[in-house]
Image (cartoon, rainbow, N blue to C red):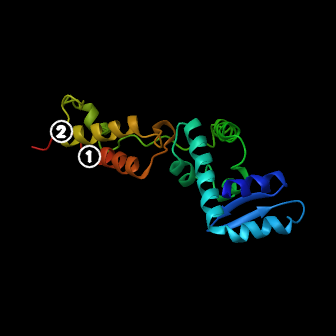
Amino acid sequence: MTLTIIESAAAAGVHLATRNGQIELTAKERPDAQLLEQLRTHKAAVITELERLQWLWLERVAHLLQSTPEHLLQSGLIDDVDLLEQWRTEPRHAAALIQQAANSITETDRPEPPQVNTVNTPTREQTDSPAHILTAATASPDWLLARDQYMGHLMTCPACYAPTGRYCATGADLRQQYQFTPMEPTP
């Protein structure tokens, strides 16, 4: 029944969406009294169905972008207004627009790459002496663990992309832990 109401509204030129538990409608002309009465009578069911349809659209867009709906919302790539206005469009069009916007960012607009691990970078005084070279083979077990956790997360998290410095909360924490864990073994 609710899907029929939504479809009949669309056929009458009335665009329905939901935000904050309310039905929002957009139309060039005032909807007829029968449609408004159906919306009042079945308001809770229509809201539930609209939320489901909007989330389904968002999942499809996220799938096309190889992302998650949560990431798209948290990163601001899609916001509440997009859900209101775009959920009836083809997900591939929204995904293409988001991808095009991401690709059009100029080199100067891109975030700075992550800082080099300054804790483990030798100073000028250290490079003059032939002491010992820090590599993964001579690194501390704590550093190896931090590195493995960070790299393992990067390889599996769709929200993290190290070349542009984009990390989810867990990725940012693991990156910071890796960056500030001393590479030198403690005696």
Residue 26: image quadrant is bottom right
Look at the image and tell me whether residue 41 can be seen: yes
Disc 2 on helix, strand or loop? loop
* Lower sequence index among marks 2 and 1: 2
Instruction: Tell me where residue 72 appears, x and y as whole percent.
Output: 56, 48
Residue 183 in sight here: no
| Mark linked to residue 162 | none
Q: Is residue 55 above or below residue 60?
A: below
Packing grade of label 1 (10 A; few <14, some 14-19, many >=20) is some
Tell me what residue is drawn at x 26 percent, y 31 percent.
128
Residue 94 screen position, x and y as percent: 68, 42
Check contact, mark 2 vs mark 1: CB within 8 A: yes
Q: Label 2 to label 1, Cα distance in Å? A: 9 Å
Left or right for 23, reference 159 = right
The structure residue drawn at horizontal position 77% and vertical position 70%, both measured from the top left corner, is: 37
Residue drawn at (52%, 43%) of the image? 112
Number of numbered discs overlaid on the protein picture? 2
Give the vertical position of 131 relative to 71 (above or below).
Answer: above
- Disc 1 marks a residue whose amino acid type is Thr
Q: Hey, which residue is sitting farthest front in the picture?
A: 1
- Can you identify the residue that label 2 sits on? 140
Looking at the picture, how far across and down is residue 80, in whole percent? 64, 59
- Identify the residue under disc 1: 181
> Looking at the figure, which quarter contains the C terminus?
top left
